[in-house]
Amino acid sequence: MNEAAPNIVAGFDVERARRDFPALAQEVNGAPLVYLDNAATTQKPQCVIDALSQYYARDNSNVHRGAHALSDRATVAFEDARKKVQAFINAKSSSEILWTRGTTESINLVASSYARSVLTAGDKVLVSAMEHHSNIVPWQMVAQTCGAEVIAIPVSADGELDMQAYENLLDERVKIVAVGHVSNALGTVNPVEKVISLAHAAGAKVLIDGAQGVPHFAVDVQALDCDFYAFSGHKMYGPTGIGVLYGKADILNAMPPYQGGGEMIKTVSFAGTTYNELPYKFEAGTPNIGGAIGLAAAVDYLSGFDRSAVAAYESDLLAYTHQRAANFEGLQRVGCARQIAGAFSFLLAGAHPSDIGMLLDQQGVAVRTGDHCAQPIMKQFGIPGTARASFALYNTRDDVDRFFAALEKAKTFLM
Ligand code: PLP
């Protein structure tokens, strides 16, 4: 195998990138690690690890209003991180960047604050049938409290959004459309530009779940014209426990606060409390300062590459995986959309996905198995789950070859 093995593709040197990730240079169960669980969380480059450790070793302090040098340093680094994220997704203002714990909390914030304040009985929230549970359940929780409905946009057997059915569903009762940029379960890249423009024409606001989008390609929230965009630091080479909600300033300004506490207020009295300005109105309590600084290091790291070269490299790797899968007896791909990024979901005839995962792990190959927090689409496909190999910029054709070799060996135990 590996005939054409392009490790340097159009300006991206994967071998060089691999050296930035210390976790990749280890053996697992006696074999060099092949890490293919990146849709769950990516490994971290040394610069992110260093940024976290330097913050805690030198600058650790609470942010804002501190009367000392360490607090000043922490505050500057924390707010610089926000500006880096603003530039990274091309938001108009850094006050449109809210720190959260991750995609899940970002969506819960919009559901609890925005949706709760606009939805009334009979209103509708549209989500796609392939969404992650975190882009379904928060809407259901709010809808239940106000008599609104959460409706699934149908998805085809190939794993593509049915855009005609979507258009048919859009009427004046649809107040919110929430769709993933890229499906974590199937890898489908959704036509979000079209989703957004159609929703806007129907008078609805749009949230894009970008958890699997930002790690794989450059995102421009102004060009997309989405109202909200949510993502997690840990899926884009940053730390866990930190994420982002982008929202258009006029919408965020009109929204009630999400949580109450310190930092989100201007004045507090028993006669009545007034709220802080953006973004602090939505950031009650001590934030994840180290996490934000670590995420900024991940943004710097990613921005140091030609992102379209990285995207071309990753898509070549996925095409190579599909090519090898086509010749692998008994393997069935789950999700065959025309545009795919990051994830390769599959089944092996006669084998339970969790057995595949275990047998691959014994050979040093890390994948994920199960429903991938996307039970509705698994149910539609009539399967309990899949095995999923998911890619990051540091994966190689050699990883793909080792994955298929391990799968071949696993097959001998499974069939
Ligand atoms: N949305 C998608 C598409 C995801 O893949 C994930 C995590 O796998 C999430 C949301 C939730 O992300 P987090 O657990 O970081 O909040």
Image (cartoon, grey):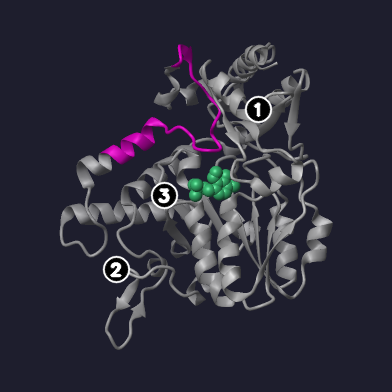
Judge whether residue 285 is colored magenta. no
Q: Nearer the viewer, residue 141 or 166?
A: 141
Amino acid residing under circle 3: Ile
Residue 159 visible somewhere in the drawing? no
Q: What residue appears at the point 44 percent right and 68 percent down from the top-left corner?
A: 258
Where does label 1 land, which residue? 352
The image quarter containing residue 323 is top right
Rendered location of residue 33, percent (x, y): 49, 19
Is disc 3 surrounded by few (<14), some (14 to 19) or many (20+) residues within 10 Å? many
Mark 2 and mark 3 in contact? Answer it, CB < 8 Å: no
User: Between marks 2 and 3, how big is the CA–CA gap?
Assistant: 19 Å
Residue 242: image tag? 3
Q: Which residues are magenta?
A: 28-53
- Using residue 122 as the reference point, say whether residue 114 is left or right of it: left
Q: Which residue is mark 2?
A: 262
| Amino acid found under the numbered disc labelled 2 | Gly
Residue 117 occupies which quadrant of the picture?
bottom right
Disc 1 marks a residue whose amino acid type is His
